[in-house]
Structure formats: structure tokens, C-alpha cells
Amino acid sequence: MDQVLSSSTSGTHMEESLPYAHVDSSLRALAAQAQGFGRFAIGGLHGSVYHVTTLAEDGPGSLREGCRKKEPLWIVFDVSGTICLSSYLNVSSYKTVDGRGQRIKLTGKGLRLKECEHVIICNLEFEGGRGPDVDGIQIKPKSQHIWIDRCSLRDYDDGLIDITRESTDITISRCHFAKHDKTMLIGADPSHVGDRCIQVTIHHCFFDGTRQRHPRVRYGKVHLYNNYTRNWGIYAVCASVESQIYSQCNIYEAGQKKIAFKFYTEKAADKEGAATGCIRSEGDLFVCGTQHGLMAESGGHGVFHPSEYYPTWTVAPAADALKHLLKHCTGWQCVPRPADQKCDAK
């Protein structure tokens, strides 16, 4: 498999701008450009363009109809507005759901990425999901090569993004999370020991007053960099059973609750004793009285380094300039839909 990475330098500082500026140069320039674990996601690169022409939740020209098709598709919108989902919208493999050029909000339920691969979700809003176990974006089981970019998510009854049950090689970038409790869960529960395979990168995201789980991690390896998390209600980041979290150049700004990092002890189903996870903090900025809450690494294992898995990523210093950028340039953006340039056939 060819590796395609955005131009960057591991461990060095970029100018004060978000990554991926080049991906708006043409419609399909998003493909295989994610930084981090989701870097191979090509979405519907080799498929035709499918036009969503109605806000109806199903039927001809609907988003659901495009997402259920088996062939690769690059899905774009010819309408703006709210799509009210009465049930989860399942996204099949090799799809790009590209909201550039319109303003699309999904409500009622959310997207489900189930046993699929190579999916890109870009420039959408998710708000007001209702019902038990209703997440904005639910990634399970055994899905891989996923990139969620430049989305706004708020106010769902369960999670905003959940990544569980052996889903892996995922990047979440440039997203805005607000008005929510259990923001992002990675790793289902201690009985799902297969979640040891999970690998997720979360970068340049703004967690804006959400209560907890930025993220909460069981088993998986998670690289957090250049995120801004403020005014949480319980904690910012939680490491639980066997998880490894590498927190790099993030900004943690406490409100009433001052501890950024929490450690929960749980027992893996195939182990005799209980264990927590590990967090390594490097270059993070703790402001407004924030206490990091780090504990000594224990249990005979440390934290992975991202360079063991991918050679390059862009990282800026955790400073006020980054904070201001993330406050204004994350989530859904009013950007035009780029022109489509013909790509080679499959």
C-alpha cells in the first residue's frame, strides 16, 4: 500500500495555520491526506460523484440512498438544510460524504460506520440526536481507514463520536465539539479485549465546554496534538485499562474542575488483575489553574511514540495563537465546493 502524507515535519513547528489547506484545491484532494492513523483513507476517490438533491431522509437523491450503495462514491450536496434521521444512517465502504459548498445539519440520529473501510466525512453539522445509544458518529465494529474532518458536533443523547469494537486507523481533525456530556469514547468496555488493536489520531480539534471524554480511552493507542480543551465538567482526558495516550502540544484550560488527566482502573476480561492506562504529556500547556494530574507510569508498559507508526505530522507550539485559531477555524466552515478534476479509473 502506498503511503500518502501531507507535507509536514515530525516534531517541528509550523506557521500558525491549520493543516490541510491544499485539500480544498480540488474535490478529491482530500483522499489519503489525513495526518496520523487515518492517513490511508481514500473515501470515494475512484468512484463517481453522487449528488444529494433532497433533504428527505431516504429515497431518490437522498444522502441515505448514496451511503447505502456498494460502489465507491464521492457524495456532494446540491441543497442546504437539515436532514432529520429517524434511524441510524449506515455508511458503506469507499464513500466520501463531502459537505463543502453547502450547510448540512444531521439531527434525530447519526451516522453509523459498521464493518466498513475507507470513509471520509467532511464539513457537516451534527446536532440534537435523541434516543438511547444515539451517537453523532458511531464507528463499530471492525471499521478501518476513517477520516472525520471539519465537522461540528453537539447535543446528542449518548456520544458525539464513539470508536469501539476493533475499529482502527482513524483520524479526527479540525472538529468542534460543544454542548455535550460524554464526548468521545474509544474502546467499548473491559470485556472487549479485541480493542487492543485500536489506533486513533485526534488533532486540531476544539472541545468547547463539553463535560468529559476528550477522549476516554480503553485499550487503544491515541495521539492527541494541537487540540484546545476548555471548561470541562469532570476531566479532560481519561486513560483506562491498558490504554496509551500521547498528548502533545495541546492546550488544557480548566473551569471549575482543575484536573486535566484522569486514570480509571478496570479489569481486562483476560487478565487476573485490574489496570489503568498511561498518558505521556509533551509540550502541553496547562492554563487557568489547570493541574495535569499525571501519575507515574506503572504496570510494566509505557506509552507509544507516534513516529513508530507514521513519520510526519504538523505540530505547533501550545500557545495563544493556536488557541485563537482553533476557536475560529474548527467545525463546519463556509467553504465553496472545489471543482472535480478527473482521476484515473480504478
Image (spheres, rainbow, N blue to C red):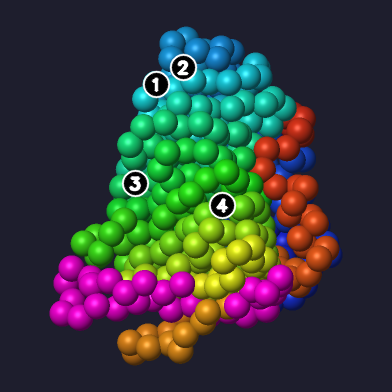
Classify residue 283 as left or right of residue 279: right
Is residue 94 shown in magenta? no
Q: Amino acid at mark 3?
A: Lys
Q: How many marks?
A: 4
Q: CA distance from mark 3 to mark 2?
A: 22 Å
Q: Amino acid at mark 4?
A: Thr
Residue found 73% across the figure and 37% down from its top: 333
Specify few, some or many for label 1: CA neighbours under 10 Å numbering under 14, 14-19, or 20 or more.
few
Q: Are marks 4 and 3 in contact (CB under 8 Å)?
A: no
Image spot of residue 143 (x, y percent): 37, 48
Q: CA distance from mark 1 to mark 4?
A: 25 Å
Residue on which disc 3 sits: 140
Classify residue 50 as left or right of residue 329: left
Where residue 71 is drawn, which disc sits there?
A: none
Residue on which disc 2 sits: 57
Q: CA distance from mark 4 to mark 3?
A: 23 Å
Q: Please, is residue 14 above or below residue 281 in the view?
A: above
Residue on which disc 1 sits: 86
Q: Element under label 4?
A: loop
Image spot of residue 334 (x, y percent): 76, 33
Q: Please, is residue 42 above or below residue 100 in the view?
A: below
Where residue 210 is drawn, which disc sits there?
A: 4
Q: CA distance from mark 1 to mark 3?
A: 20 Å
Report the mark closest to the observer, 2 or 1: 1
Q: CA distance from mark 4 to mark 2?
A: 29 Å
Classify residue 158 as left or right of residue 311: left
Q: Which residues are magenta?
A: 262-291
